[in-house]
Structures are given as structure tokens and as C-alpha cells.
Image: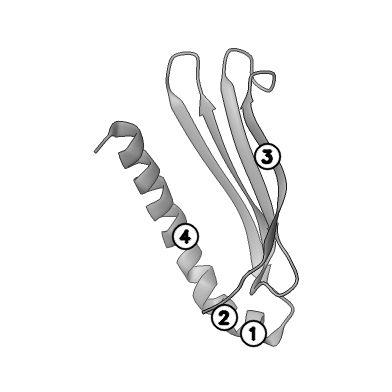
Amino acid sequence: FVVNPIHAVYEMRDCRRTIPNNIVSSASYATLDGHLLAGEERVSVILRGNDAVDVEIVSFSRSAPSINGRIVWPFIGRMQKQFFLKEMEHLSRIATCK
């Protein structure tokens, strides 16, 4: 059991001003002291005027300065790519109702 504290940097829901004729929702969070990693992540979803949906995940992370962070980084760093690929596959299945 591991506690990895984060905080919301911002949240934007159903914003129509960012990209004309589109609806954008986005959320960003960052790690806090005590987290095994140091970094930020943003997830954005754009509903286009033609009913297409775009999903963007932007992530920056590195090991936390703690000894525990440096120990787990080689393992977590490799797992992140797989995690994001699985996350996108899951969102795609939901969007296509499969």
C-alpha cells in the first residue's frame, strides 16, 4: 500500500472559448512531497464540431528526490508507457461502445 499525494493544478469543463466550434474539457494535476515521482499530468478531451473526439494526455515525470523515489523510478518509468497505451485503448473502447 502506497500513498502518492497529488493536487489539482486546474480543471476546465465544457469550455467553448479555447477552440471555436469545439467543446474542451481538461484537467491537470501535479505531485506533492511524499509522492514517489515528481511531475505533472494533463488530460484533455475535445469534442469537435463534426462529432469527432480527440484525447490528449501529456505527462512529465522523474523520480522524486527521496531514496524511495530513486529506487522505484527504473521500474515505474518503464511502466508509464504501457499505462498510457492501456488508458488510450480503454477510452477508445468506451467511445466506440466495444
Q: Identity of the amino acid at label 3?
A: Glu
According to the image, label 3 marks what residue?
11
SS under mark 3: strand
According to the image, label 4 marks what residue?
81
- The answer to whether the residue labelled 1 contacts the one labelled 4, judged by CB atoms less than 8 Å apart, is no
- The answer to whether the residue labelled 3 contacts the one labelled 1, judged by CB atoms less than 8 Å apart, is no
Q: Quadrant of residue 83?
A: bottom left
**x and y, in percent, of residue 34 in the image:** 71, 75
CA separation in Å, label 3 and label 4? 24 Å
Q: Considering only vertical position in the picture, is 28 above or below 39?
A: above
Q: Quadrant of residue 32?
A: bottom right
For the rendered model, the colour scheme is: one colour
According to the image, label 1 marks what residue?
68
Q: Quadrant of residue 20?
A: top right
Nearer the camera: disc 3 or disc 4 = 3
Nearer the camera: disc 4 or disc 2 = 2
CA separation in Å, label 4 and label 2? 15 Å
SS under mark 4: helix
Q: Identity of the amino acid at label 1?
A: Asn
Judge from the rendering whether residue 71 lies leftward or rightward of residue 87; answer left or right. Answer: right
Q: Residues within 10 Å of mark 3 (few under 14, many from 20)?
A: few
Judge from the rendering whether residue 44 lies leftward or rightward of residue 35; answer left or right. Answer: left
According to the image, label 2 marks what residue?
72
- The answer to whether the residue labelled 2 contacts the one labelled 1, judged by CB atoms less than 8 Å apart, is yes
**x and y, in percent, of residue 36 in the image:** 64, 74
- The answer to whether the residue labelled 4 contacts the one labelled 2, judged by CB atoms less than 8 Å apart, is no
Q: Considering only vertical position in the picture, is 47 above or below 93?
A: above
